[in-house]
Image (cartoon, grey):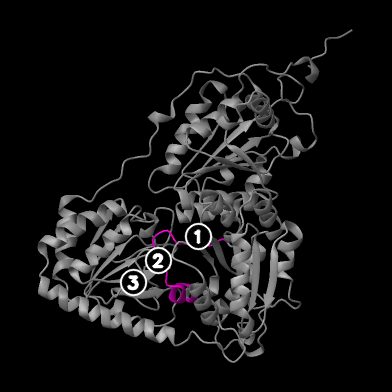
Amino acid sequence: MGSDATISQTSQTAPTGYTTSRAFLEALAEGGVRYVFSNLGSDHPGILEAYAQARVEGREHTLPELVICPHESVAMAAALGYAQVSGVPQAVLVHVECGTQNIGGMLHNAAKGRVGVLMYAGASPYTQNGELFGSRNEFIQWIQDVHDQRGIVRGYTKYDNEIRTGANVKELVHRALQFARSTPAGPVYLVGPREVMESEAPTQQADATYFPPVAPAALAPDVVERVASALAEAERPVIVTSYLGRDRDAVPVLVELCETAGIGVLESVPMHVNFPADHPLHWGFQWNDQRHNPLLEEADVVLVLGSDVPWIPTKNRPNADARVFVVDEDPLKEQMPLWHVPAEVFARADLGTAVRQLRDRVAELVDTEAAARRRERAAAEHERLFRAKAELEVPEGETITPEYLVACVREAIDEDTLVLTEAITNFPTVSWHLRRNKPGSLLGSGGGSLGWAIGAAVGAKLAAPERTVVSLVGDGTYLFGVPSSAFWMAQRYGAPSLTIVFDNNGWNAPKASALGVHPQGTAAQRDDFGVHFQTRPDLPGIATAAGGAWGRTVKTAGELKESLEEALDVVRSGRSAVLAVQVPGM
């Protein structure tokens, strides 16, 4: 009888001691991860066994909580929401390359929004004849074996690596989290073949204490002097920002800087509260504005303080004689192949640190009488801008306008309510009419992939269970968010929120884009854009069926305020709610 080179899987015994999977989960907990948002597969038996053993031994509290997510995109969105509220990266666990690809859109948001998250995916076992415990035993493991699984995400991650041995798994996890937390924050990715994750590992490994995030960087003294002098001496200075408010403590410092020198603040594509909207130095918001902004175009000094798109050059930009300065965590936008702002200084610094430096130096240089004149002018501009917007906050008969809807939301919530905005074509409406003032009370995805908000609301509520969470989304965005998965999770894990849907019966953004390029084109003349919902979906009904949510569709202005109050009461009682509000648009 000839020798048989095939080794039976059953001849390989399961490890009985401390495994790589257990060490991996412990390392996450040591690094501050409280939740592992998970969509499980055939590569995760070691993880599941580690959790089961922990429960039997009464030490499940030493591991992050496993949150089951029926869709990977929602898992990633929930992790982002938690990190955006808490500042602590969480973990997402998905199934090999298929699960990795399903998080693609939210991975984009994590990268562009600078949100720390650790993604872990198993890899198809690398043995097929039972040579090692965990060897292939399902047909799908041949199909899911790809050449470069890590390459799927490499264009978006700050760090990626493969766990090849249990001997240093904690070092890899702590290093990955160090990357995720260091400015600019972002996503990281680890993979682990099943054989490695099932194997035994040493109990003594790397200590998370020695993997802190990189310390904040400050502006060089000569840069502080140059920028502060320009701001102090300017006649019409303006600061443009998009995400300084990611550091909530930096917002009141920016207020002090602007009050000291009489500087107006323009928020461009804001995803945070960067400056109190009701402050007299606030000069409003700009998104895809197809018009000139005289406050920007007339400025003689412009400080871009944390912004990827401070203006759209073809539509509005500073005048050619303006002095422009760029201060950012990533001043050259290293992941954007085409980007440039004509500035005399590009400086890399932590935004909170930089604004403190500038505040202190400007206070020493500024002429107080000149600053008072600038404050008076800026306040007059603020009053003019916001008065004009307030006049729009009325319904048109019984038709609910987006401006009226947002104004009603503003009146119904308090300053501590956490609002997630993903209203897309109504982004500007939310900014102008919600008028948030408290740092940390408004969040956007920071990226361009739709479907973030309703999943992020689950993570946000887990991070801040004492706060009321409200999401403002478009109807298309709502469907992108896999509501059946998101509201099932919200019910299972006790994370209720209110979702308010701008129901304009279709995807308005592609129509607006087409009109921006072809205003007199055939599509415009025939109103033929292919973006209407021919039959309106029952948007609240999806959440009701999947997650027991309260749901209602509002069609007239007369029923809006009462329905909004009822929805908020439901959420405060512990049940999710979806209020679809029919607005014009399509």
Dot 2 amino acid type: Val
Residue 294: tell me if it is visible.
no
Q: Residue 497: x, y in percent?
A: 60, 60
Horizontal side, residue 90 vs residue 501: left or right = left
Q: Which residue is mark 2?
A: 309
Mark 1 → mark 3, Cα distance in angstroms: 20 Å
- From which residue to which does the magenta span run? 429-449
Say left or right for 581 vs 138: left
Q: CA distance from mark 2 to mark 3?
A: 12 Å
Q: Please give the name of the residue rendered at 58% of the width and 78% of the height, measured from the top-left corner.
A: 561
Bin the neighbour count of mark 1 within 10 Å (Cα to Cα): few under 14, some 14-19, many 20 and up: some
Report which residue position mark 1 lands on.
447
Q: Three-letter amino acid code at disc 1?
A: Gly
Dominant SS of magenta comes to loop
What amino acid does circle 3 point to? Leu
- What residue appears at the point 27 percent right and 77 percent down from the top-left corner? 319
Give me the residue at 60% from left, 38% from top: 65
Side of 36 relative to 297 (left or right): right
Q: Quadrant of the C terminus?
A: bottom right
Nearer the observer: mark 2 or 3; the answer is 3
Between marks 1 and 3 in the image, the one whose residue lies nearer the viewer: 3
Of residue 573 and residue 482, the one placed in the foreground of this image is 573
Under circle 3, the secondary element is: strand
